[in-house]
Image (cartoon, coloured by chain):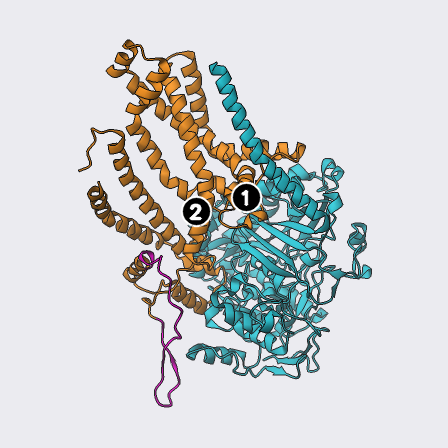
Amino acid sequence: MWNYILRRTLYNIPVFLAIIFLVMVALRVTDPVSAHLGKNATEEQIRLKTEAMGLDQPFIVQYAVFLRDLALFWKPVPDEEVSSVAQSGESPAIKVEPSPWKRKVTRSWDQDLPVGKMIFDAVPPSIAVMGPTLVITAAIAIVVGLVSAFNRGRTADKILMFLAVIGMSISVLVYIILGQYFGAYLPKQRYSAWPFEVAVDASAAGGRWFFFAPANWVAYCMLPVIINVIVALGYDTRFYRAVMVEETRKDYIRTARAKGASTARVMFVHMLKNAMIPIITRIMISLPFVVTGSILIEVYFNIPGMGRTLINAINAKDFPVIQTFTALFAALFIASNILTDVLYALADPRVRLS
Amino acid sequence: MRALSAFRTLSAATAGLVLLCVPAAAGTAALEAASADTKVLQLPIRTDGPKSLDPVKGSTTYDNMACAQFYETLLVNKYSNPMEIEPLLLAEMPTSTDGGLTWHFRLKEGVRFHDDPCFPGGKGRVVTPEDVFYSLKRLADDKYELENWWLLKDTIKGFDEYKEVQNAAPSFDYDAPVEGFRKINDLEFEIVLKQPVYRFLYILSMFQTSIVPREAVERYGDDFGFKPVGTGPFILDSWVPKQSLTAKKNPNYHAVMYPDRGEWSSEDRRNRLHRAAGQRVPFVDRIEFTMFPEDQPMWLQFSLGQLGYTQVPEDYFLEAFDKASLELKEDYLRRGIRAHSDMLLDFIFRGFNMEDELLGGYTEEKKALRQAIALAIDLEEINQTFYNGRTIVYDGPIPPGLRGYPENGRSDAAYRGPNIALAKQKLAAAGYPDGKGLPPIRFYTSQSTINVEMAEMVKRQLAQINVQFEPIFTDFSTLIESINKKKAPMFGFAWASDYPDGENNLALFYGPNESPGSNHFNYKRAEFDALYEKILTMPPSEERDAIYAQMRDMVLEDVPFVGSQARQRFYVINPWLLNCKPTERYYAWFKFLDVDNSKR
């Protein structure tokens, strides 16, 4: 298995490098200097900003420097050395331009913060919302899918699928706006002890693990999780129903029933076990989003997570943050793909990793 | 049995949830108990807040809003009348005995920086003239990308030369002298200008010229923008960029008093704004800003009484205000909510690139084409449709409230639409009778729903004179790039005055400021430039007002833009927030706010 993981990882390195390359090329179609300097920049300011952003360097140098910094993100950057000075005789001192290869902390162009710190601070709040969302959605959707598939064509199935389609047809923004209004604002107006807050306020400045305190999680994350689950349920329920319907047609179900297995046993033991491959696929595809967060939810509920960090970076043309985010997402996606294959083998002994 | 089991599971889950909720409620209760003794002020920052807490790197309203709590300037706008300035770190207004060339300053005694480890023993030291010189010199340092160099460029004697020499040197020497900076003693100093530039005093009230201690900048380096050390009324507690900013009261804040009763207008006195007259500020122990990129959560939190005041977002205006009377609705008044409106120093326009082959130029034909376009556009219809009639439509580039603003907003020199008959005549005079032979007008504007809809309206208005209008929607940076590179023949833009003087707006037409500078129109007229150079050195007077009007009408005749509009900002204020008169002219006024916890 370890050989397989190592081999897949090596195969994916070119893919990873290509993703970063393409993203960096795509970003450089627009000019971030104007966006950062605003309306009245002088030529001198434009030159200084371009240099500060490293955009005066050839693209390949920018690419190589970014990869180098990405690879060494774990290693502290040595203290800034005093810039070397060339002086000869009585001629005036000449400023020596710093080398683009000199390693320094990659800072956000928009926030002036180290990008690593921004990402590390943003990951826990996203996990606080998206982790429970993934678990709860998968659990409910699998059960509903099973029930619906088992009652295929009956009223229960029709009602469940009707609700799923309705759920899918409504924009996520509508859920968020209505959820915030009816789930937090209105009850809070009547009952001051209502546990859900409209949005995260300044009290959340208590560090990156703030949302993991139970009381804070209930106040700020539970409503977003409920909304997320409702939004995702429609899609997931229909998917799992389709998977389960496929399974109900198989011979082993008929055999299990003929042997006198109860409905619950057929559903939750035989059928669920055999449907694990598509279930694992679905869950593993969603896994990277646990870390990368949900843009709309985080923006509306003021959750300082990855989704909000990304949308801020995109709006501000903050290339270092967008590039790092993309690299992280690509790495997570590749990792989850490899993990999916490993889980296939664990779930189904017939699958061999080779 | 199964039903019983399910019930037990549900009960356990409910109990768990309740247990989780109890600490939340208890936490709130504890906070409320604490707040009975402590005055905490919660305020919103619309959009995503400041980018840096280093004033030399700041440029946006939000940078200003945050920096003004931690740092202070030599001069500041008056809270009771923000169009005027008064001393803040100075003991008195600066004086000049040679007609504004040399300015004499006396620092207020005993003003100390925040206590911080950058000082010996961690105790903030007294502000000196060296701090003033150091803070201004930072604006000239390439290291800060000259974000705010424009404020002092060509202003102080020897300063431009100092900038050139130091930026070419291996390291920027802050100890090197500047001819125009003269220290007299530990409290007094002089600044000598190249020529008497009247706006200089306004510049000294802008947050970018805030006074910072050298020790802190050198100790914190690139992180100084996250560890502000100034003389301001508040000390940074925490800043989560794009999320929140909290600060506590500076216990060593120098003696600043709430404006006297006599300084307030009768309307302000009716709103009880004078209630704290003569008292020492700040009143609150802690100030907490939350950033809101979306309006709904901000509005709902305000409605729950969790925020002291808020701007009224466009989408919520009719929920709170009566459209016809612009008065607050009854249910808001019943809840004790108060409204306040503030006229912004806006210049919203649709500009022409005067170097464009089709739309630019100064010949009679070229002017006639722009005049025709201006005459066909109905700004009042735009105002009524998109702003609920809440902008002021006016002639010229100088917004309401400033000298040079035409009486009733109208100037005889203006080609204000709609006047379709005259527009058609002008179009014919331009060589395009009935629009024949005129290529489509390419109009660059930023991508947003309101801009798309507004462009549709302008398209319809111009179609009345058979002018084809071709809007091009871009993101904001592409728009800036297109304008800076003189690629946009016509463009939608706006300008907010940096300081309350029409000179700031007239600078937008000064030839040397052409793109990528602030003269996005690339307007160049020798007579205009000569007049601009003249007014720079003139203090407010009737003579200067007459020149402002002459320059305004000169621009109106040449029509480098179609305009103008200025927005009125509406605010709602919760009853527990006292002394609140929001303004966007400056942001050092939060120290005057007070909180009545009994009204929460």
Looking at the image, which is closer to me, B23 or A66?
Answer: B23
Q: Are marks 1 and 2 in contact (CB under 8 Å)?
A: no
Q: Give how far apart the Cα atoms at labels 1 and 2 are.
A: 21 Å
> Are the residues under marks 1 and 2 on the same chain?
no
Q: Which chain is orange?
A: A
Q: Residue at x 45, y 24 (%)?
A: A166
Residue at horizontal 68%, vertical 63%?
Answer: B251
The secondary structure type at the circle numbered 2 is: helix
Subunit of mark 1? B
On screen, residue A149 above or below B459: above
Q: Dot 1 corresponds to which residue?
A: B294
* Chain of the residue that carries numbered disc 2 in the rendered image: A
Crowding at label 2, few (<14), some or many (≥20) Cα neighbours within 10 Å?
many
Q: Nearer the viewer, residue A72 or A3?
A: A3
Reply yes or no: does residue A73 show up in magenta: yes
Q: Which mark is residue A123?
A: 2
Which amino acid, mark 2?
A: Val
* Main secondary structure type of the part rendered in magenta: loop
